[in-house]
Amino acid sequence: QVQLQVSGPGLVKPSETLSLTCTVSGGSTSGYYWTWIRQPPGKGLEWIGYIYYSGNTNYNPSLKSRVTISADTSKNQFSLKVTSVTAADTAVYYCAKNKVAFDSWGQGTLVTVSS
Amino acid sequence: QSALTQPPSASGSPGQSVTISCTGTSSDVGGYNYVSWYQQHPGKAPKLMIYEVSKRPSGVPDRFSGSKSGNTASLTVSGLQADDEADYYCNSYAGSNNVVFGGGTKLTVL
């Protein structure tokens, strides 16, 4: 059973860049989409985007201008960067493995945007 | 792309059945058989309960079932148990390699 672990700063200043990494263990990254999803406090889930194991990416149109997802296959890691953050980007950020559905999730990490 | 529409809340007594709806459009729910449902307990990551409209992952009780009619998908929980109390989210493929979530439904077991 694959396991996913999110890591990164829990506090980011407004206008700066949010950076998170998801480390995959216990399985191969091949054949799957590796996805970022976030959840503002008390609110619902929002799909951010994914990177396919081949390197192709796709992003939520509402976030596309500020989001980059990349992968380091040698380390079994994929990363998220969100630029020019505001308080609206405060959320629990999850990474997930996806083929036809999000079948494995990381534990999530709260990122707060505040000065 | 707009979020799928779910009722904010649903409830039922232990042993009863409850159905949660998820309404989209012909561009998402109605256009593809890639609807999935997730259960989320407070402070926990979501857990996949149903995929491809009606398929259950290994380990998910058969009390959970999914269906779809037109632009509306549904999750039915039968034989309600206390541990079923959680938030439930639907998700659908929305074309052009995009996906969309529903706003979530809080299920209360009375």
Image (cartoon, grey):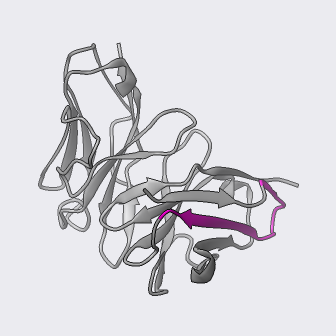
Q: Residue at x 78, y 59 (%)?
A: A9
Q: Quadrant of residue B25?
A: bottom left
Vertical comparison of B33 with B107: above or below: below
| Residue A12 within the magenta-colored segment of the rendering | yes
State the extent of the magenta-drawn residues as a range.
A10-26
In the rendered view, does B58 fall on the left or right side of A48? left
In the rendered view, does A10 fall on the left or right side of B22? right
Vertical comparison of A101 with A57: above or below: above
Judging depth in this view, the residue of B90 and A33 nearest the camera is A33
Residue extending furthest left?
B69
In the rendered view, does B44 fall on the left or right side of A99? right
- Residue B90: x and y in percent read 33, 49
Q: Residue at x 45, y 45 (%)?
A: B46
Quarter of the image that includes the C terminus of chain B: top left
Q: Residue at x 69, y 53 (%)?
A: A90
Vertical comparison of B41 with B90: above or below: above
Residue B1 showing in the rendered view: no
Q: How many marks?
A: 0
Vertical comparison of B33 with B77: above or below: below
Q: Quadrant of residue A42?
A: top right
- Residue B57: x and y in percent read 26, 49
Residue extending furthest right?
A115
Quarter of the image that includes the N terminus of chain B: bottom left
| Residue A14 within the magenta-colored segment of the rendering | yes
- Residue B59: x and y in percent read 29, 41
Judging depth in this view, the residue of B89 and A85 nearest the camera is B89
Residue A45 showing in the rendered view: yes
Q: Residue at x 37, y 77 (%)?
A: A31
In the rendered view, does B9 fall on the left or right side of A27? left
